[in-house]
Amino acid sequence: MMRDNIDRPAILNEVRAAFYRYEQALISNDIAVLDELFWDDARTVRYGASENLYGIEQIRAFRNARPSQGLERLLDNTTITTYGDDMAVASTEFSRDGSEKIGRQMQTWVKFPYGWRIVAAHVSLMA
């Protein structure tokens, strides 16, 4: 891949908008948007802080069962890199009031005809 196809401004802006839309949905527990932004497929994977979820059905079940309070968080060191016109990786750290732990989140985004979707995600916590 040619380097001039990485982080093209228009594509980067699209992914950045999708990423921050997801973040807003996450902290406000907007399950419909969270569901929309994950690829609706059995091959979608989400590794969480305490769960491994394989396929959109497991991801949906997790979202519907999780508490809707205490979701506010602050992001730090957010990095989004696009590769061509239809693939991106978003990485960020996060913290929550009252917790000493640092969270880490990585998402692989793919652009489908109907928009950008997360096809794989990993969330972990560090002491």
Image (cartoon, rainbow, N blue to C red):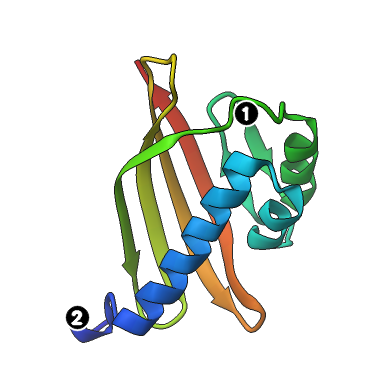
Tell me the kind of residue under disc 1: Glu
Q: Tell me what residue is drawn at x 61 percent, y 76 percent.
A: 115
The quadrant the C terminus occupies is top left
Residue 44 shown left or right of residue 120 in the figure: right
Q: CA distance from mark 1 to mark 2?
A: 36 Å
Q: Position of residue 39 (x, y in %)?
A: 66, 62
Which one is nearer the viewer's eye here, 7 or 47?
7
Neighbour class for label 2 at 10 Å: few (<14), some, many (≥20)?
few
Mark 1 near mark 2, Cβ–Cβ under 8 Å? no
Q: Tell me what residue is drawn at x 58 percent, y 40 percent.
A: 27
Q: Position of residue 60 (x, y in %)?
A: 77, 45
Q: Position of residue 105 (x, y in %)?
A: 43, 41
Residue 26 shown left or right of residue 93 in the figure: right
Going from N to C along the chain, the mark reached first, 1 or 2, is: 2
User: Is residue 85 positioned above or below 43 on the image?
Assistant: below
Q: Secondary structure at mark 2?
A: helix
Q: Tell me what residue is drawn at x 42 percent, y 15 percent.
A: 99
Q: Secondary structure at mark 1?
A: loop
Q: Which residue is mark 2?
A: 3
User: Is residue 87 positioned above or below 106 on the image?
Assistant: below
Q: Which residue is mark 1?
A: 51
The circle drawn on residue 90 is none
Tell me the kind of residue under disc 2: Arg
